[in-house]
Structures are given as structure tokens and as C-alpha cells.
Amino acid sequence: MPRWQTPILLLALGAFPLPARADKPFRFPEGSLGKNATLKYHGNLPVLTVSGTPEEIGTAVGKLALKPGSRVLGYPKAALEEFRLSLLWKRFVALGKEMVGRFPPDYQKELQAMRQAAGAAEDDLIAGNTLFDIKKMALCSSLMVEGDRSATGGPLLGRNLD
């Protein structure tokens, strides 16, 4: 092929780009851990059900949900960057650690077991569990149903980082 035809060929190929292949949407792997922890799908909705001691609950959440979905750990820092607030990251982590220090002991044990089971960095896990409570700046909707108004008889809490 003569040299003068090469740029024309490249321009022609660029005019008709090949379709890009999108990554498959993330799906949690279904599984169970012992008899008190399962992650399974109801339609397209992943449902994690756990019970047991704080350590058992944290381990199950860490292994079944957080470890396979570990990219969620980067979300709080990315949200701060999106709002040009990344300089506040260390301050929010420090406030989060202070907040975790006030959690009931069972919740602290659960969080620690979750971190260990998922192999998560402490700062990322703390920020993910406290940032949107420390500063209700954006991105969070929640719904609370009191026990006497729910079909289960117990309180229901739903939270969406929208």
C-alpha cells in the first residue's frame, strides 16, 4: 500500500468505530456461611440475611458482601472528590473513628469482624459506615418504619446512597 493511502485508511477506520464492549454489571456471588448467613437473589435484587453473634454477623457481611463488592469502599472518598472536598478526607475519617468509639460494644465487634473478613482498610470501612451520618451533605435517602407499623413487628430501616 502506498504511504499516502495509510492516513486515508486510518481516517476511514476512525469514521466507523467498532462498538465498545461494556463490562458486565456487577453481581454479588450467591453463597452462604454456616446456617445463619446467606446471600441470594430475589429477581435481580441481592438479599443478604445474617444472624448470630456480632462476630458472626460481621464475618458473614465481610465475606459474603464486602469482599466481593469491595469497590464500594472507594465510594466515600470518590464522593468527596466529586464535590471537591477531598482535603476533608482525613478530618472525616478522624470524626468517623470518634463516632465508632461511641458505638455500642457489639457494633464495634461487628465492624471489626467485617473489616478482618473482607481484608478492608480501616479508614475506608469507617468512612463508609460514618461519613454520610457525620455530614448529611448529599447522596443519602433513608426510610424508617417503627415496629408497631411493620409487618414483621420489628423496626425496618432502609438506606439508599442515591
Image (cartoon, rainbow, N blue to C red):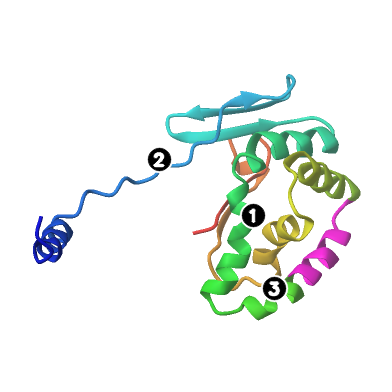
Q: Give the residue type at disc 2.
A: Lys
Q: Is 60 rendered above or below residue 85?
A: above
- Name the one closer to the observer, 30 or 52: 30
Disc 1 from disc 3: Cα separation: 13 Å
Label 1 Cα crowd, 10 Å radius (few <14 / some 14-19 / many 20+): many
Instruction: Specify whether residue 140 is in view.
Output: yes
Mark 2 Cα shell of 10 Å, populated few (<14), some (14-19), many (≥20): few
Mark 3: give few (<14), some (14-19) or many (20+) Cα within 10 Å: some
Which residue is disc 1 drawn over? 73
In the shown orientation, is residue 65 left or right of residue 10? right
Q: Residue furthest right?
A: 105
- Tag 1: residue type? Leu
Q: Earlier in the sequence, mark 1 or mark 3?
A: 1
Give the alpha-carbon distance from disc 2 to disc 1, as whole Å. Answer: 20 Å
Above or below for 33 versus 78: above
Residue 143, image x, y percentages: 57, 53
The structure residue drawn at horizontal position 80% and vertical position 71%, both measured from the top left corner, is 94
Range of magenta residues: 93-104
Sequence-earlier tag: 2 or 1: 2
Q: Which residue is pictured at 70% across the width and 31% down the height?
A: 50
The circle drawn on residue 24 is 2
Q: Identify the element where label 2 is drawn.
A: loop
Q: Is residue 52 left or right of residue 86?
A: right
Residue 25, by quadrant, is: top left
Drawn side of residue 38 relative to residue 35, left or right: left
Which of the two discs, 2 and 3, labels the residue nearer the N terminus? 2
- Element on which disc 1 rests: helix
Q: Residue at x 53, y 65 (%)?
A: 139
Does residue 158 appear anywhere in the picture? no
| Residue that carries the numbered disc 3 in the rendered image | 89
Residue type at mark 3? Trp
